[in-house]
Amino acid sequence: MALRSLLFRDDQELNACAIHDASHVTPGSSGDHVAKIQLALRELDTAAIDKAELSAKHYGASTAKAVLAYKTKRSIINHSYETAADNIVGKMTIASLDREMLTKDGSARRWPTFR
């Protein structure tokens, strides 16, 4: 499944996350793909993410907390091995973020370029 939102569709790491378990985005990760997740969380849930994490594009404690809150609010749980939401961005989470961001793409808003 290729991601379709303007924010995510051209990102190789996030498209891999949508397909491969080994490509899940976890605490400790850094890069443009993390910054895009952070932007989506802030846009969709007004998540409070630490400024240092944002500037470093780092998946730290506040990003993990925002991911957990996002997943809990939407009941994103893989019932085959989980009983509660976790703080990892995997296939189900990136698909949900992508769907919601795709809905926002209908506006005239342009997302920042992360290159």
Image (cartoon, grey):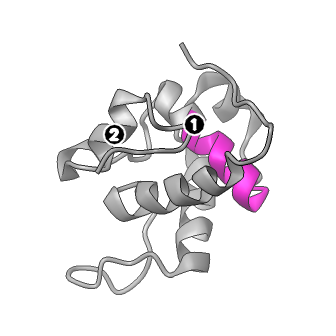
Is residue 34 shown in magenta?
no
Disc 1 marks which amino acid? Leu
Residue ID for mark 1? 6
On whether residue 46 falls in the magenta region, the answer is: yes
The residue located at (52%, 40%) in the rendering is 59
Q: In this orientation, which residue lies closer to the viewer: 21 or 106?
A: 106
Q: Is residue 88 left or right of residue 108?
A: left
Is 100 rendered above or below residue 77? above
Which quadrant holds residue 9? top left
Judging from the image, what secondary structure is the residue with disc 1 in? loop
Question: Can you tell which of label 1 and label 2 is closer to the viewer?
Answer: 1
Q: Which mark is residue 15?
A: 2
Q: Residue at x 53, y 59 (%)?
A: 99
Q: Position of residue 19 (x, y in %)?
A: 23, 49
- Dominant SS of magenta comes to helix
| 27 w.r.t. 57: above or below | below
Where does the image place residue 98, in percent across and percent down from the top left? 51, 52
Residue at 73% in and 61% down: 45
64 or 38: nearer the eye? 38
Q: Which residues are magenta?
A: 36-47
For the residues labelled 1 and 2, say whether their Cβ atoms are less than 8 Å apart.
Answer: no
Q: CA distance from mark 1 to mark 2?
A: 12 Å
Amino acid carrying mark 2 in the image: Asn
